[in-house]
Image (cartoon, grey):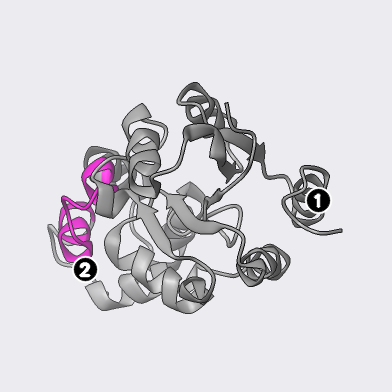
Amino acid sequence: MSTTTRVLLFDVGGVLATNGWDRTARHRAADEFGFDWEEFQERHDFVAHDFETGRLDLPGYLDRTLFYRERAFQQDDVADFMKRQTQPFADSLAIANDLAASGRYLLATLNNESRELNEHRIRTLGLDEHFSMFLSSCYLGVSKPEPEIYRIAIDITQHAPDECLFIDDRSLNLECATREGMRTIQFTGATELRADLVSRGVLGG
């Protein structure tokens, strides 16, 4: 079996930037706009999978979770708030830049994200400067840690599973990727990631 890395797959939230619309961000929104957290969270849980896998767009998500009744704020206010949650991890993005500049690898994201937020993050973070593919749940119709998303990613890249190195901050996502034959790195910080990539011969020291 091959042991040469040819494809690097990066999670986005928690690796290249802050998480986009996680539980912390949703709590923050409840405080910002003064809506009932428990009621909202119950509705979010009901539609979250459809939202992340492209079956429900952002206006539809907001209709189902918040705007099923009159509010003192507008959909655009919440959508703008959601987008503002994205903050870059500069050191991680610098690693992606170095990998892209080497010209040795196919770089792709492998992340769970709704379509509108995903496309906002691609533009805001400049991911299209580093990555050739965006294997996101909203495009693939399936999300991590479902085994199918890793199989689809492998098929799209047209490389052997063990030529694919997947970087994610969540151990369950990595465990499921390993079961499909990918090699993995758990992200704990940019310094540790760079050292790990150097030790594996993926990045120059």
Relative height, residue 18 to residue 127 (above, below): above
Judging from the image, what secondary structure is the residue with disc 2 in?
loop
Which kind of residue does numbered mark 2 sit on?
Arg
Q: Main secondary structure of the magenta part?
A: helix
In percent of the image, x 28 and y 53: which residue is there? 138
Residue 184 in picture, x, y percent from top left: 61, 36
Rendered image: mark on residue 198: 1
Question: For this rendering, which residue is in front, 85 or 89?
Answer: 89
Relative horizontal placement of residue 165, taking residue 49 as reference (left or right): right
Q: Please identify the residue farthest to the front as the structure is shown.
A: 1
Relative height, residue 88 to residue 181 (above, below): below
In percent of the image, x 52 and y 74: which residue is there? 125
Q: Quadrant of residue 83?
A: bottom left
- Position of the N terminus by quadrant: top right
In 3D space, how far apart are the residues under numbered discs 1 and 2 (Cα atoms)?
52 Å
Judging from the image, what secondary structure is the residue with disc 1 in?
helix
Q: Earlier in the sequence, mark 1 or mark 2?
A: 2
Rendered image: mark on residue 71: 2
Relative horizontal placement of residue 85, taking residue 118 as reference (left or right): right
> Which region of the structure is painted magenta?
48-65
Residue 194 in picture, x, y percent from top left: 78, 54
In percent of the image, x 64 and y 70: which residue is there? 97
- Does residue 51 appear anywhere in the picture? yes
Q: Quadrant of residue 115?
A: bottom left
Which kind of residue does numbered mark 1 sit on?
Val
Relative height, residue 16 to residue 164 (above, below): below
- Does residue 43 appear anywhere in the picture? no
Relative horizontal placement of residue 45, taking residue 168 as reference (left or right): left
- Position of the C terminus by quadrant: bottom right
